[in-house]
Structures are given as C-alpha cells and as structure tokens.
Amino acid sequence: MEQRGIHGVWTHRWTFILAAAGSAIGLGNIWKFPYMAGENGGGAFVLVYLVCIALIGMPVMMAEVLIGRRGRMSPINSMRFVTREAGLHGAWTGIGWMGVVAGLLIMAFYSVVASWALKYVWATASGAFSGLDATQVGDRFSSLLADPLQMLCWHSLFALMTAGVVLLGVNRGLGAVANYMMPMLFLAVLVLVVYSFLHGNFSAGFHFLFDFQFDRLTWPGVLKAMGHSFFTLSLGMGAIMAYGAYMPPHASVAKTIITVGVLDTAVSLLAGLAIFPIVFANPPLEPGAGPGLLFVSLPIAFASMPWGSVFGTLFFILVTFAAWSSSVSLIEPGVAWLMESKKFRRAPATLLLTSIAWLLGISCVLSFNYWSELKPWFLLHRTPFDFLDFLTSQLMLPLGGLFIAIFVGWFMKKSVVVHEMDAEGHPLFDIWRFVVRCVSPVLVALVMVLTLIDSF
Ligand code: PHE
C-alpha cells in the first residue's frame, strides 16, 4: 500500500531538516530549558535531560517521522492508515487526537511567552534597558506581567502571526524563517556565550550546568527533564509526524533526525551557557527565578554591552522567529486534519484552531496577574499557565511518545519500518529498533509511575 498526500512534499531533504529544526528549536530551548534547569538543580537536571534526548527523544522522533511518512497525511489520518495496515483497533488513532489537542493547549501558553519576546523586541529597540541594573531590569519584567491588557495585545499579535504562516501553508510559509533565521539565532546565542565568558561569572555558570549533583535529583525533577526532552523536540503530539508526511520518499530518517536532535540540544546548552554566567554575576538574580529567567537575565547584558540595544533587539527578533516557526507546527496537525477529513479550506481551519488556542491563552495571560493566586484543585493547585504546561509536557507528550514507540516497535511490520526508514541492512537499525521496542517505552512508563508513587 502506498499513500499519496494532498499537502505536497518538501522539495529537499534540507527543507525537512530546517522545518523540523524550526519546530524543535524555539522557546523550549531558549526560555524553558534554562529556567527549568535553574529550578531543578542545574547539572542533575541537565544530565537526565541529555540521557532522555539520546535514549528516548531521538529514537521516538524517528518512529514518529516514519509514521507520518508512511501515512502521508495529517497525524490523525496517518495514524488511522498505519493502524489499519497493521490490522489493529481504531483506538490507536487516539494518539493523533491527543496530539491535536495537546498542540492547542501548548499554543495557549506558548503564545504568551512568545508575546513577552515580542514585547522585548520593542523594549530593547527603544532603549528601555540602557543603563539599568539587575533590580531595575527585574522590575520591568514584573510590570509587564502586572499589565494584562498589554500582554493580551502582544499575545493576540503573536496568535495572528502564527495564523498568517499556517494560512500560507507550511511549505510556502516556513521556508524563509527556517533558511535564514535559525542559523542567525545560533550565531546570536554564540555571541552571547562569548559575552558571558568575558563579563559574567562563567565558571559558576558552567559548574551549575555541568556538575552532576545527584542529591538534587527528585522523581518529579526526572519527570520534568524527561517531559522537557519531548517538548523541546516537538515530540509526542504529531508535529513531527505532520512534517514527516511531507518528507521526500528517499531520505534517511535517521541521519535527518540526528541532525535535528543535535542542533536542538546544542542551542539549549548554549542558551544555558549564555544565561547562567550573567545570573551568577548579578547577585539579586538567582537560577531558580522561574519562567522570567530569560527576560530578567539577558537584558542586563544588553544594558551594559556596547551596541546592546541593537544586539538585544536583534536577539529578541530571532527568539520571536524561533517561537514562530514552532508555534506553526502546534497548529498545523489540526489544520491538516480539518482539511482532509472535514473538507475545510485552509483559511477557516486555521482561524478556528488559532482562535481556540488564543482564547485559552487568555487564561495564561491572567495567570500572572488577576489569577496568580487562584490555584484551584481542579488545576491541581496550579495557575492555568502552569497547569497547561504540566498537563502537556509531563503527561500528554510523554504518553503520546510512549504509544508511538510501542506502536512502531511492536505492531508495525518490520518490513514496513525498514522500508520507511530507508535502512535496508544498516547495522544500527536493529539497535534502534531494540531501543524503540524495549528501552524508550520502559523508561517513559517507569518515570511516570515512580513520579506518581513519589507524589503520594
Ligand atoms: N519544540 C518547541 C520548542 O522547543 C515547542 C513545541 C512543542 C513545538 C511541541 C511543537 C510541538 O520551543
């Protein structure tokens, strides 16, 4: 059985790499990784995260791409196709459904963080940070959080930007972002690392990130690190499956994914190396500052470096672009499904889904002001922002990944897997298949169960 998609095919292997990297590299790397490492004991978190990327993230990512490539449709319909092909019960399609929902839930809080980056483009460009000290920079961020109306405006702008690209269609909408912005972001982060090396407390930052103190490790911390390895690779919700559907038929899945995974990890580690030396050199800041870490640390550097407001503006533009190319992939799986199965045209499908995410996002805007103390039991005593992050990163994405691994490892015919991986006779193929069958799912399940036991 061969499938033909209705959405077109990437023109080149590199287009796929750039698009997948565009989805993977985003706020997860530059905003979330540093703040989570800071809150969860630095090196201990980083080590678990790296192990998870290698043993779970990249192997499962290959599995996810190959489902998409086999099905050549939206995640829901690709799942339906491969499930039928394997003669299994339709319930497996649930992976696709959960993914579409997870995408919208992630978009809700993702858009709010992206809106901070947008606001900071404006703020750095107008020189708002010049000459400020660490405390004043922190106050600026707090006053943004205290202003729901302003946050709502930026949040809406970002939602519109995302809708705009999804409207154009991934092939056309994404090319420019991926081609030029990603390499530039990489360079900008490198420049910041050099700045931190010269002007920050580099050795404290380095030791914080890479000294593995196991006594700082807790099961909930391990789950967070594992969940983050899914989040950062855009895994477990169909984004990579949807992109895999547009992958040209003869391109090595393994090589492609390894490239994406390595690039993604490099950006995260470099972002950490840029941020923590600044944190340690400016005593009022602390690594556990929480979700604002990026926005209270780097502006300090921009405040004091020559050409700081120019470079800072450029940096936040690039962060916005990175967030943009990720948010597109949060909406795309659902849009592709509405178009295939519900006969929607692209425009209404995009508008519908972006609006749902935007509406939900308002609760995340309010999480930092009016509702900051409102942590109801049904959100597990969290604000909507924290709850959506928890629900998606620590439950839905790992569960999605778990089922994808089980499906590809145990239920997809080996010949189909070999064919789609383009891995005929490759010595590493069997190792990969073993990892996807036995290692990744067991690890994911184990971490989830142990965390659950630990929290009672
Ligand atoms: N990987 C993206 C980031 O790190 C976020 C994302 C998660 C995008 C899941 C798509 C799907 O910013």
Image (spheres, rainbow, N blue to C red):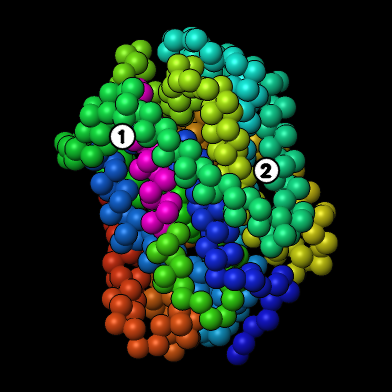
Tell me the tag on residue 29: none
Q: Is residue 171 above or below residue 228?
A: below
Identify which residue, 280 or 50, lies in the foreground.
280
In the rendered structure, does residue 264 fall within the stretch colored magenta? yes
Give the residue at mark 1: 40
In the rendered structure, does residue 202 fall within the stretch colored magenta? no
Magenta-tinted stretch:
261-279
Question: Residue at left 56%, top 85%?
Answer: 85
Please name the predominant secondary structure of the magenta segment in the image: helix
Badge 2 crowding class, 10 Å Cα cut-off, few under 14, some 14 to 19, many 20 or more, is many
Give the residue at mark 2: 357
Q: Is residue 173 left or right of residue 383?
A: right
Identify which residue, 240 or 220, lies in the foreground.
240
x and y, in percent, of residue 180 in the image: 59, 50
Q: Are marks 2 and 1 in contact (CB under 8 Å)?
A: no
Furthest residue toward front: 306
Q: Is residue 372 left or right of residue 398?
A: right
Question: Residue at left 21%, top 33%?
Answer: 207
Sequence-first tag of 2 and 1: 1
Q: Is residue 430 above or below residue 57?
A: below
x and y, in percent, of residue 412 in the image: 46, 81
- Quarter of the image that includes the N terminus: bottom right
Mark 2, secondary structure of its residue: helix
Q: Is residue 255 left or right of residue 336?
A: left
